[in-house]
Every structure is written in structure tokens, then in C-alpha cells.
């Protein structure tokens, strides 16, 4: 008698499943720089592996270290979700709607080594730069053509340049499924924001639960548009659930106005929209 399928529940396994099971399913993303970007889970996985190589080889990121993200719901943020957690580091999603003093507090409390930031939120980091001096580098989620020409931050890196020359093959480490993988901080609570840590195991189990018929009913026929932010409770875990099921993912980025959302809903035939009532009103 032998036991079968002794596989730990790891976020990287969701991406590997997507490569085998639905590599051609689509991910669509509005871009902060303008326009709409489209690629597949298979292509996203290759870029997540390029990121994993860059994190380990260029930036020297170790398992258990915190990497901050200050970003909209986009294809690049999706790559960060898997590339960071896949190597056993911790994805710390920073809520840009917090007050500057709270952003300072959570970056320092989490001991973020690097922060990946969308162009929109670069001024937020510039305003607090003198208070987050332990951050080793800021990676701007854009290409070389759209990198800012000047900034109060002197340790800027370009995301596309960072990953461009990296191999698209990477063997994910077999980390402990109970190890930490994602960090969110509360908002609207008394005192300082409180850190809440998710494990690899809890994240995969949450994805499985979210996809169930009596929950969000996410399948390969779903066209999912999450307005709920990836910087707040991991967009209700839907980037992971969609990756598991092969649902088409549609990311709105900064386009939260009615016309921009309608363009994606109508153009991509989205049939599952996730957001708080205020957004839809």
C-alpha cells in the first residue's frame, strides 16, 4: 500500500496547473500607461518565472522576506502575486488609500526590502521617501519608455528591464505549505493598522472554496472582472481561484469610472463582476 499525491498546497502549484490545463485562457488588463493588454496564462507564467529569477538572482530575495506592492489590478500585479509567493517570499500588498503616516508605518513594520509600484502611486512613495530609508529599491511597474525622467527617489528600477533578460524557466522551491506567503494590513481600525498573514495552505484552500458553485461559482466559462482591489484582501482571492479554474481574468487597473468599466465589461463580455455596492452605484 502506498500513499498517493503527497503534494503540499502551494501557490506555485496553481500556476503550474494552469500551464498544463489551460495555458491559452486569457488575461486582459487595462494599462496605467494607456491601452489594453492581452495575453494568456501560459505567457503570464513565463513572465512570473522571469520575475522569480530576477528576485532571486538580481535582487537576492530570500524565503520569508517581505516584498511590497503598491499597485492596481493589472497583469503585472498578477505576476507579482505568483512570482513573489512562488519563491517563498511574502507578498505585502500596500493599500494606497491609507494615510501617509500609516503607509510609512506598515512599510517599516513589515520590513519590506523592495517595493513594486505603479506609476500612479509613485508620488505616494516620493512623499514618504525619507521615512522608509530601509527599503533597498523601488521597482516601477512599467517599461523603459514610460519610466519617469526625474523622481525624488534615487533607487528606481524598471520592471520590464528587470525581468527582460531572465530565463522563463524556473523550478519553484518546495516550501512548507504552512509558511507565510501574503501580508495585508487592516484599515479603519483603532491605533496602527494590524498585519494579517496568510499561509500558502490557507490561500490555496481559500481559492478552492471561492470557486465552488455555492460561493463565486468560478469555472472555465467565467469571465471575471475583479474591481475589489488586489491591494485589499487579495481581491477576495480571485486571482488564485481564476488561475486554478481557467477563468478569463479582466483587470481594470485605474479605470474605476463608469465608462472605463463598461468598456471592459462590454468588450470582454464579463459575466462575473466583483466589487462593493458603491462601485456599481
Image: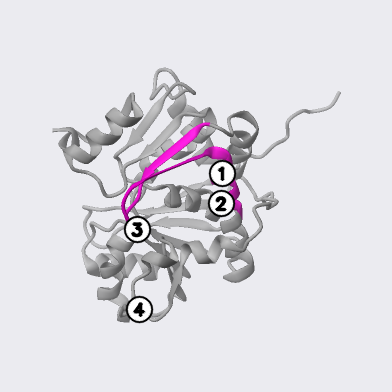
Sequence-wise, which precedes: disc 3 or disc 1?
1
Residue 31 marker: none
Tell me, yes or no, whether the highlighted magenta stretch contains residue 26.
yes
Would residue 278 appear left or right of 48 to someone viewing this image? left
Label 1 environment density (alpha carbons within 10 Å; few <14, some 14–19, many ≥20): some
Question: Judging from the image, what secondary structure is the residue with disc 2 in?
Answer: helix
Query: Residue drawn 35% across and 50% down?
Result: 31
* Distance (Cα) linking label 3 and label 4: 18 Å
- In this figure, which residue is indicated by the disc labeled 4? 153
Label 3 environment density (alpha carbons within 10 Å; few <14, some 14–19, many ≥20): many
Toward the top, the furthest residue is 213
- In this figure, which residue is indicated by the disc labeled 2? 47
Residue 94 marker: 3
Question: What span is in magenta?
Answer: 25-49
Question: Judging from the image, what secondary structure is the residue with disc 3 in?
Answer: loop
Residue 43 marker: 1
Amino acid at each position: 500500500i502506498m500513499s498517493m499525491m503527497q503534494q503540499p498546497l502551494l501557490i506555485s502549484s496553481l500556476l503550474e496547473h494552469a500551464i498544463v490545463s489551460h495555458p491559452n485562457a486569457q488575461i486582459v488588463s487595462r494599462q496605467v500607461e494607456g491601452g489594453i493588454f492581452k495575453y494568456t496564462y501560459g505567457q503570464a507564467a513565463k513572465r512570473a518565472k522571469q520575475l522569480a529569477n530576477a528576485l532571486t538572482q538580481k535582487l537576492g530575495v530570500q524565503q520569508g522576506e517581505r516584498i511590497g506592492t503598491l499597485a492596481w489590478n493589472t497583469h503585472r500585479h498578477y505576476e507579482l502575486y505568483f512570482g513573489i509567493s512562488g519563491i517563498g517570499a511574502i507578498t505585502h500588498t500596500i493599500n494606497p488609500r491609507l494615510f501617509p503616516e500609516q503607509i510609512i508605518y506598515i512599510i517599516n513594520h513589515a520590513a519590506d526590502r523592495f517595493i513594486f509600484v505603479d506609476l500612479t502611486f509613485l508620488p505616494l512613495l516620493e512623499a514618504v521617501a525619507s521615512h522608509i530609508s530601509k527599503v533597498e529599491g523601488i521597482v516601477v511597474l512599467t517599461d523603459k519608455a514610460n519610466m519617469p525622467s526625474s523622481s525624488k527617489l534615487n533607487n528606481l528600477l524598471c520592471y520590464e528591464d528587470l525581468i527582460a533578460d531572465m530565463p522563463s524557466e524556473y523550478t519553484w522551491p518546495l516550501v512548507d505549505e504552512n509558511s507565510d506567503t501574503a501580508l495585508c494590513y487592516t484599515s479603519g481600525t483603532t491605533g496602527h493598522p494590524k498585519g494579517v498573514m496568510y499561509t500558502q495552505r490557507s490561500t490555496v484552500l481559500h481559492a478552492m472554496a471561492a470557486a465552488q458553485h455555492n460561493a463565486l461559482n468560478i469555472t472555465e466559462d467565467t469571465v471575471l472582472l475583479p474591481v475589489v482591489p488586489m491591494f485589499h484582501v487579495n481581491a477576495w482571492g480571485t486571482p488564485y481561484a481564476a488561475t486554478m479554474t481557467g477563468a478569463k481574468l479582466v483587470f481594470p487597473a485605474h479605470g474605476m469610472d463608469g465608462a472605463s468599466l463598461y468598456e471592459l465589461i462590454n468588450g470582454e463580455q464579463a459575466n462575473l463582476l466583483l466589487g462593493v455596492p458603491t462601485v456599481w452605484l
